[in-house]
Structures are given as structure tokens and as C-alpha cells.
Image: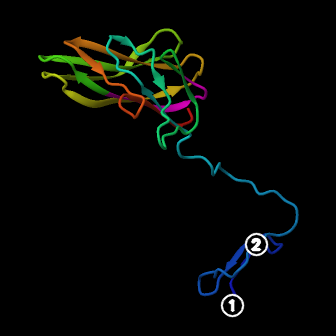
Amino acid sequence: MPGQIKIDDGSGNYTVLTNGGSLGSDKTITIPNTTGTMALTSDISAGGLEAAQQFVQTANVTSTGDITANWAVPNVENQGNLGSLVSESSGIFSFSQTGFYKVTFVATCTVITSGNSYGKFRIYSTDDNSTYNYIAEGFFGGTSDYDIHTLSTSTIIDVTNTTNDKIKFYFAEQTGDTRLQGTASYNRTYVEFLKLGDT
């Protein structure tokens, strides 16, 4: 029996017939040529990341406080961002769409002076566009000149209001002389936003 697919014989019956259990590549499937609509029961395009963005710190950070300057979109070699749902102004990161986002702060940290030195870096969040609280924190330290570490901290946030829900990043020297290393040439100290799905 030649391979064929029979779709609706007029009585509401749907039958699949195959030759030896398989349709060859030379078989043709013909949809009835009458006008109609084929509807999907779900969005087959759903799934996967909707946005993946990075911002690099282009200069060393040496003072305690919010990191308000020198954020830039990386543009070296093949680096690029998927989408543009996150924007930055004076160190405040805003979202143009609601959803669940994974936020990662990667810090390359250096101890400048010998002796016990350490610092910390944080991710801060607000849900009222005013009061910020830290929701992730990392520490680094050392005892010798130019001890260097690359560390990270991350969190998942639920952005439900694009006007009020925002993120910022913070660095603090705790003891001794420490700093974050920045450069525009490649990712050294940077932040990353991945949109995981809708809220």
C-alpha cells in the first residue's frame, strides 16, 4: 500500500496510513484546498531567553558607594546583547518589560596594600523607585599587594512594575586599600541581565 496521510474523510475520521510504517521522502502531504483557519492551542514560539544583556565597568572603582558612572555596553569583537529590555542611567538599571530576570554582578577585585584588606560588592533593588535594599552580596580580600580575585553574586528578581522596580550596584572598601578593576577592552567587572520568562 503506498504511503499516505488521509485527513478527514468527510465523516470526521482522521487516518494515517504508511508503507512499512514509514513515509518516504518522496511522499506529499496535501492540505485540503478550501479556505480555513488552523489554530494553535499554545504559543509554539514561547521558551528560551527573551533578553540577555551585559554592561561592563570601564574604569577602576576605588571609592565606597553606589557605582554611578562608567557603565557601557560591550562592543569588542563578537560581543553583543540579545534585546534591549534593560537600560542604564547614572548607575540605575531600568526594565522596559515585566518578567523574571536573573541579575549577576561579576567583580574583579584587587588588594592594593599589604596586610589584611577586604571589600564587598552588592546588588540593590527597589520596588518603589526610591528605597533600595541589598538583595545579594559578595566579599573579597587578601593579605598581599595585588592579590586579585574574580567573584560573583547573583539573584532572580520579579519585575512587576517597570516604573518602580529597578536595580543598582554597590562597592565598599572595608579594610585597607581595595578596588574593582574595570576596562572597556573586555569583561573584567561587569553585570548581566537574563530575562527568564514572564511574571
* Dot 1: element: loop
Is the residue 122 above or below the residue 19 in the image? above
**Marks 1/2: CA distance?**
17 Å
Rendered image: mark on residue 1: 1
Q: Which residues are magenta?
A: 94-107
Count every numbered label the image shows and give the total: 2
Measured from the top left, where is residue 160 in percent x and y? 56, 24
Measured from the top left, where is residue 105 in percent x and y? 38, 28
- For mark 2, what is the residue? 7
Label 1 crowd (10 A; few <14 / some 14-19 / many >=20): few
Is the residue 49 above or below the residue 93 in the image? below
Residue type marked 1: Met
Task: Reply yes or no: does residue 51 show up in magenta.
Answer: no
Is the residue 135 above or below the residue 84 in the image? above
Which residue is the extreme one toward the right? 34
Considering only order in the chain, which callout, 2 or 1, is on the residue closer to the N terminus?
Answer: 1
Identify which residue is drawn at 47% across, 42% down. 77
Label 2 crowd (10 A; few <14 / some 14-19 / many >=20): some
* Dot 2: element: loop
Identify which residue is drawn at 77% across, 57% down. 38
Rendered image: mark on residue 121: none
Measured from the top left, where is residue 56 in percent x and y? 43, 28
Identify which residue is drawn at 81% across, 56% down. 37
Please identify the quadrant where the C terminus is shown: top right
Residue type marked 2: Ile
